[in-house]
Amino acid sequence: MAYQSTGVDFRTRLQDWIPKLVLSPSLAAMLIFVYGFIFFTVYLSFSSSKMLPSYDLIGFENYAKLWDLSAWWVAVVNLMIFASLYIIICTAIGLTLAILLDQKIRGEGVLRPIYLYPMALSFIVTGTAWKWIMDPGIGIENSMHLWGWTSFQFSWIKDRDMAIYTVVIAAVWQTSGFVMAMFLAGLRGIDNEILKAAQIDGASNFSLYRRIVIPMLRPAFLSAFVILAHLAVKSYDLIIALTGGGPGRATELPATFMYSYTFTRNSMGIGAASAVIMLMTIAAIMTPYLYAELKEKS
Amino acid sequence: MASVEQDTAVRTGGISRVFIYGILLIFMLFYMMPLFVMVANSLKPLHEITGGNMMALPQVWTLEPWRQAWSAAQIGVEPTGLKPYFLNSIFMVVPAVVISTILGALNGYVLTKWSFRGDKIIFGLLLFSCFIPFQIVLIPMATVLGKLGLAGSIPGLVLVHVVYGIGFSTLYFRNYYASFPTELVRAAMIDGAGFFRIFWRIMLPVSGPIIVVTVIWQFTNIWNDFLFGASFGGRNQPMTVALNNLVQSSTGVKEYNVHFAGAILAALPTLIVYIVAGRFFVRGLMAGSVKG
Amino acid sequence: MRGYFGKKTAIVAALLASTSMAMAEDVEVLHWWTSGGEAAALNVLKDDLAAKTIGWVDMPVAGGGGEAAMTTLRARVTAGDAPTAVQMLGFDILDWAAEGKLANLNTVATEEGWDAVVPAALQAFAKVDGNWVSAPVNVHSTNWVWANKSVLDGLGIAQPTTWEEFVAAMQAVKDSGKTALAHGGQAWQEATMFDGVVLSVGGVEFYKKAFIDLDPAALGSEQMTEAFNRMATLRGFVDDNFSGRDWNLASAMVINNEAAFQIMGDWAKGEFLKAGKVPGTDFLCFRVPGSQGMVAFNSDQFAMFAQAEAGAQTAQGEMARAIMAPSFQSAFNVVKGSVPARTDVPNDAFDDCGKKGMAELAEAASAGTLVGSIAHGHANKAAVKNAIYDVVTAHFNGEYDAATATTNLVSAIEAAQ
């Protein structure tokens, strides 16, 4: 008996440890490959690194240079315009399509994959097609002219002030269907009895959605926001494929700025400084979300 | 749990239904447009593209660009087409997706059903990792892979994709398992079931939908990656790098029809995954991630 | 540290290279020559090496004029896994040499007598501290104009020889309703035009003072404002739809009789030849008016990275030897549109534009009017090059006027140094 009891004892103690053991490889990988590398980047941002990492510290010089560069300001302002429009429009289109698709639509099974498929493609694949579609000489504008609508104009991609909005269009194309799926899932998860009860009380369709359905989609809104925000900040392929940062430097985003300073301009220190600022911004946006998310669960 | 086929109880009248179908169709055209441009131009001879309307259907239909892109186009010095790179991508994607999904499932299970002090912070750390821009990890990652002797190899690429995939897969599974009744796990524990037994017998059988979501998400992200593939792929470059080599040439002749055919070929696996598994995708999202 | 040892072992390797050729080895080559013609040209080299039982491991990474490949290279070197040979341009070679990562090719160079046949302006990018570190493959030059002969003949325009004639010719084309200047609005394409324009304004002396010595007085001078004015003039002759267009689609406009001129490097010739056009009868090639006798060049080279193993070093030396062989230089450059990097290669295989380019290169090299291209990284380091891109492209796209562009150029270059 004594033998058996120590066995059980050992096993229960092992059981206590197993969850932590299971989690530890992921945690270790995270600490090294994410947080260790972030620390390394912070270090580089204070160093004189040019082409390859160097370890001579030079204080805040890279940050001073960074904020002096007009290109960085352009990138930051572009990100604000891009991210806010992208998140708002994707959410609006996603929600609208989800609500409409939820009206016992014939052919939903066909429409849904069509709305979703852009998420499956990278901009290495679709970039050229978008570039052509938006190009006034060979794309939509030209086709409209050929079909007789000669006053039609769509030349934003060639216009310094408007080009950033073409980036929004392509980005919305890619992810709004995915957001639609998230909202559709949220809608399908709502108990129909609640809606029927409200209808019996005489609520109109509009107020039904505004007062009951949309508030119940709060978790879907939050998830959509996280996914859209992270895609907006990481947007890189999109810019390279669509505008190459042009016309001029009008559509640079922080991600393209960072890449170009780190890898093509051999100014790794400045690139690292811009990366640190990006990470700090992400942290500032994410921390409240994480806090709310984690608090709710406890 | 409501079924995915169930529609809302809201009723709409005839006129508004026309309106609804109209909007849905307009968006369908919007989403289809780039694919149309790619497919239409991939079926034209080159002179029809450079000399004409790129939005038009082909006047002469040809499959030659597709054959070229798959097996004859020049990728570097070898006229191999994209064919040999397809396998490289498969060898990279399959293990990376499997491993990151398993780790995500186990992590989500621990974080929701075996909570301990500090688990929230660990989850927060994992979640934040989703947001790291990949460009900044390139140089330190190269150092680490070099030290591990994994530089320029497929295991190295798998490692990289697993590491940066864990954040999202954990997020999906954690949110899914959070809505699974903890009482069932407790009861099983009292009955003497261990950690892995509970996972295997109780959690896994109900995880179908969220596995679909995670696999779709990881598969598309890893398949479409270019930066890591080009930097760490070495002799085993994945298909996206080959496609990029086909499409991007700075001082050479550009064969747009072959480029488009290649682009569609490179995207086919992800497209198929979306179309085949798309039905389960909404169901999976519904069951888990958006419930928060 | 690796680089330090690498340099020493490379010397040993080069010694070995001359004595033993028995070892079969692979060379791993990182490059961005992925289009059909370019790759076909590289195949010549691959076959040459195969004849010496040296295998070729291909590492193509295309995109952004080598930018993607340079990123890959950095990851490879950081991982301690440098390729044998890397296609590289201008100052990048010097930067990598300064990091101590390149091999020493002196033995092969001495045996083959490279010093005597490679123009000095090119050697400045292939030799560091008197040691050969890379093998130049070709010389491109950027101050070319490509013109549609039938459009010019139709309007009775003769080939312009001065800037004023060039402007008048473009005006005549514009009045006729065609596009005068075919151009793709990408920063590097605008900078490529800027190469020729700066030469046409101030000649080689001004070019060197401003963009090679980076003399602030020259950079901020009246002449610089004039150069920007000329860029604005050119801007007036491009169509509304130029922004973001690929350079080869701009070439197609000239080929298809839609436009009269394009200012572009000699790689544009390939597009014309591929379309079945004949130099002299269908299209003309001439220097940017005002820059005759001067050549702004950029040269693709294969920089050799230090290898640890003797076998790899041997193969590397053989590869360098094969690159510099006159037969390869001729075969490659006929296909690529550029001219050989050594001046003693027979010109029989080249077309008229190629022959002209070879003769002008030789003249410019002896007259001292051969200058590194600003746009293609042969005048200054990457940081400065990109700072110039920023100003040139912003001005060309109408962000500010010529005087402001001059002021901004001075400050941008100062900040980038």
Image: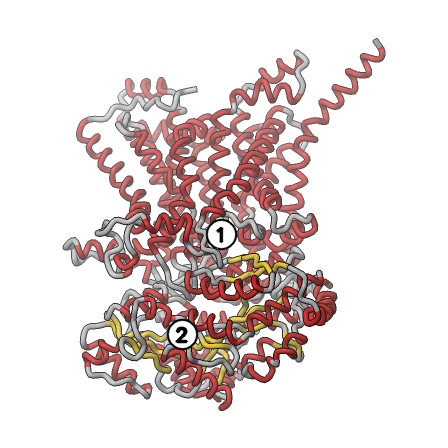
In percent of the image, x 56 and y 28: which residue is there?
A: A297
Quick check: can you spot residue C404?
A: no
Task: Give me the chain letter of mark 2.
Answer: C
Circles 2, 1 touching at the beta carbon (< 8 Å): no
On the question of residue C168 being in view, the answer is: yes
Instruction: Residue at 53%, 20% (x, y): give it.
Output: B205
Amino acid on which disc 2 is placed: Asp
Residue C266's mark?
2
Q: Is residue B183 above or below residue C216?
A: above
Q: Nearer the viewer, residue A73 or C286?
A: C286
* Marks 2 and 1 share the same chain: no
Task: Please determine whether, in this image, residue C370 is positioned above or below residue A133.
Answer: below
Image location of residue C87, percent across then percent down: 54, 66
Q: Is residue A194 above or below residue B266?
A: above
Crowd around label 2: few <14 · some 14–19 · many ≥20 (10 Å) = many
For the residues marked 2 and 1, what is the alpha-carbon distance in whole angstroms?
Answer: 27 Å
